[in-house]
């Protein structure tokens, strides 16, 4: 063979670098178009109807906290299990943009759009670009993501911050151990482990200050870090007889590894020059920093009051808690308005062929599709970065099920932050299976999501709707009239819808008797508002007339969405009328 000159070798290497750079630019451009398209799809799904439904109790509480001064807001948070970051951000948002339903919810909408590229990047780093695209597609079209993107609560923000925490951890792990995904980590991330670890700390602290349950995701990441470190220790001992990076055998392998350019998987973990013990110290220092940063939050909480505020949660028991877990996997695809028992009623009560098809999609077929996709794990699931997805999904959900045995938690709500990992794992399974099976499962999943989106947009109200109540009271109130509401917390959504004409609203606890609680001034009226949560809500007209002072002038029930509100007008002077 003719000899190859040094100049020719240099020219070939330069040409290879140019081709690699051009390929990288093409991939980034294609990725930007794909992710941008998914964001547009999510916008088309999530913007319509943003302010169409009423603010329900929890959203009205968000509005009330945002209206407080900052010291009052933080003092109020102390007595609840909530964390303050979202409400502080919402306070600034309201001051800038106003307090209509759509404006209050727009913060969650914006956050939900930012979650799409973060989820795609997480999928590309841990599994593959195809899995990342499929996972981000499911995220963009999901009815449950639509619901929380249109809710003025903490859950979408904590989902974004937790996913950012997971992503920065994965990037740091790849920086110190190498990439095992089909879409490898960039040289930039490999050269900046300390910056990535600092970003991880910031994201983790912000996530905990948004929702304290995010600490369960950090527990999962620490377990993965421990397993990864243990694997490196065992591999080094097996290969070199020692863990020390100063041994001659290790130094020889390290040098040959870099000279050969082999930097992936377990071999990189064996020959990486970062220093195992220094990396471990950096990781422990990061966890201590997070703990110290979150210490003020733990100290500030009034645990006794916060626990008593959650006393209403019923115990599910083991069977119902496990059923809730199965519901989680289905509801992340179909949304929250289709139920397991609907299929039975659709058949027995003859709701029609369309309703039977929808309910068949929503539960048996969707659950089967999700579980089938999850049965195709990524190739690096046992020891690679894809294991992080399983841990971040499984550990919080396992804790949620355990808690629900004694105190019910809505898994799709409180553990929404696990869903990006779930969607990426579903995408990874779809990417690995045969083409015909992937097509069939995608049809089931996307059809179910379509049904869920249509169902969501067809719902007119969230829980008790106080818009018609406020309208009636605003039109009929006279000077000196009193408003009493039972239970008292429902005065918050009523106050929101009467904010243009603010009046004092007195509250009665849910079990308090009405007799003796209403003492209208002479010649004045009392408007008694009974939410469906009130024990008196279902009382007949005669029983109500016997326990209120004065005459019942009118008694109507407003029943939007099936969650009723009863309005009783009591006058101490006028004779009874019938309306």
Image (cartoon, rainbow, N blue to C red):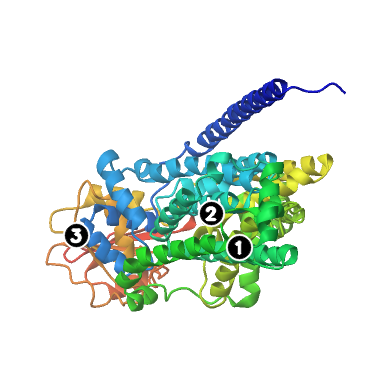
Element class at badge 2: helix
Foreground residue among 267 and 105: 267
The mark lying in front, picked from 3 and 2, is 2
Query: Residue placed farthest to the right in the image?
Result: 1
Element class at badge 3? loop
Q: Does residue 351 appear in this view?
A: no
| Point 66% across, 28% down: residue | 20
Percent x, y of residue 305: 33, 76
- Disc 2 target residue: 169
Q: How far separated are the C-alphas under marks 1 and 3?
A: 54 Å
Q: Which residue is mark 1?
A: 224
Which x, y percent locates residue 64?
28, 56
Dot 1 surroundings within 10 Å: few (below 14), some, or many (20 or more)?
many
- Where does label 3 land, which residue? 504
Label 2–label 1 contact, CB within 8 A: yes
| Separation of marks 3 and 2 at Cα, in angstroms | 50 Å
């Amino acid at each position: 063979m003719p000899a190859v000159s040094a100049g020719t070798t240099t020219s070939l290497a330069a040409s290879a670098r140019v081709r690699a750079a051009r390929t990288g630019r093409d991939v980034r451009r294609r990725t930007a178009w794909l992710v941008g398209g998914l964001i547009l799809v999510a916008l088309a799904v999530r913007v319509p109807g943003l302010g169409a439904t009423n603010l329900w109790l929890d959203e009205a509480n968000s509005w009330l906290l945002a209206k407080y001064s900052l010291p009052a807001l933080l003092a109020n948070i102390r007595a609840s299990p909530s964390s303050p970051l979202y409400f502080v951000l919402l306070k600034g948002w309201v001051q800038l943009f106003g307090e209509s339903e759509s404006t209050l919810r727009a913060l969650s909408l914006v956050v939900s759009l930012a979650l799409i590229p973060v989820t795609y990047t997480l999928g590309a780093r841990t599994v593959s670009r195809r899995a990342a695209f499929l996972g981000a597609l499911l995220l963009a079209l999901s009815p449950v993501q639509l619901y929380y993107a249109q809710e003025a609560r903490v859950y979408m923000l904590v989902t974004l911050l937790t996913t950012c925490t997971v992503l920065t951890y994965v990037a740091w792990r790849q920086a110190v151990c190498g990439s095992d995904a089909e879409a490898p980590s960039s040289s930039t991330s490999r050269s900046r482990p300390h910056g990535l670890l600092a970003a991880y700390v910031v994201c983790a602290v912000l996530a905990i200050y948004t929702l304290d349950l995010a600490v369960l995701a950090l527990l999962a990441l620490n377990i993965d870090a421990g397993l990864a470190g243990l694997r490196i220790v065992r591999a080094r001992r097996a290969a070199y007889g020692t863990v020390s990076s100063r041994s001659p055998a290790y130094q020889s392998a390290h040098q040959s590894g870099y000279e050969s350019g082999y930097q992936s998987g377990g071999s990189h973990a064996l020959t990486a020059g970062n220093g195992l013990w220094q990396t471990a110290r950096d990781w422990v220092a990061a966890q201590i920093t997070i703990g110290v940063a979150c210490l003020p939050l733990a100290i500030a909480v009034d645990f006794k009051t916060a626990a008593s505020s959650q006393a209403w949660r019923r115990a599910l028991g083991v069977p119902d808690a496990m059923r809730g877990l199965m519901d989680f996997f289905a509801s992340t695809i179909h949304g929250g308005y289709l139920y397991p028992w609907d299929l039975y009623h659709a058949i027995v009560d003859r709701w029609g062929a369309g309703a039977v098809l929808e309910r068949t999609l929503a539960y048996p077929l969707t659950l089967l599709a999700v579980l089938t996709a999850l049965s195709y794990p990524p190739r690096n699931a046992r020891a690679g970065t894809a294991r992080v997805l399983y841990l971040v999904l499984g550990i919080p959900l396992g804790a949620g099920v355990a808690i629900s045995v004694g105190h019910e938690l809505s898994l799709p709500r409180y553990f929404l932050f696990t869903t990006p990992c779930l969607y990426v794992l579903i995408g990874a399974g779809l990417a690995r299976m045969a083409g015909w099976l992937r097509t069939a499962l995608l049809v089931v999943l996307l059809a179910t999501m379509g049904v869920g989106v249509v169902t969501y947009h067809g719902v007119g109200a969230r829980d008790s709707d106080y818009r018609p109540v406020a309208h009636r009271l605003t039109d009929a109130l006279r000077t000196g009239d009193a408003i009493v509401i039972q239970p008292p917390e429902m005065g918050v959504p009523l106050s929101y819808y009467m904010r243009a004409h603010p009046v004092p609203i007195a509250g009665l606890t849910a079990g308090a008797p009405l007799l003796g609680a209403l003492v209208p001034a002479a010649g004045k009226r009392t408007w008694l508002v009974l939410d469906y949560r009130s024990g008196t809500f279902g009382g007949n007209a005669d029983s109500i007339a016997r326990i209120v002072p004065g005459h019942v002038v009118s008694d109507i029930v407003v029943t939007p969405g099936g969650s009723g509100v009863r309005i009783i007008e009591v006058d101490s002077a006028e004779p009874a009328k019938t309306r």
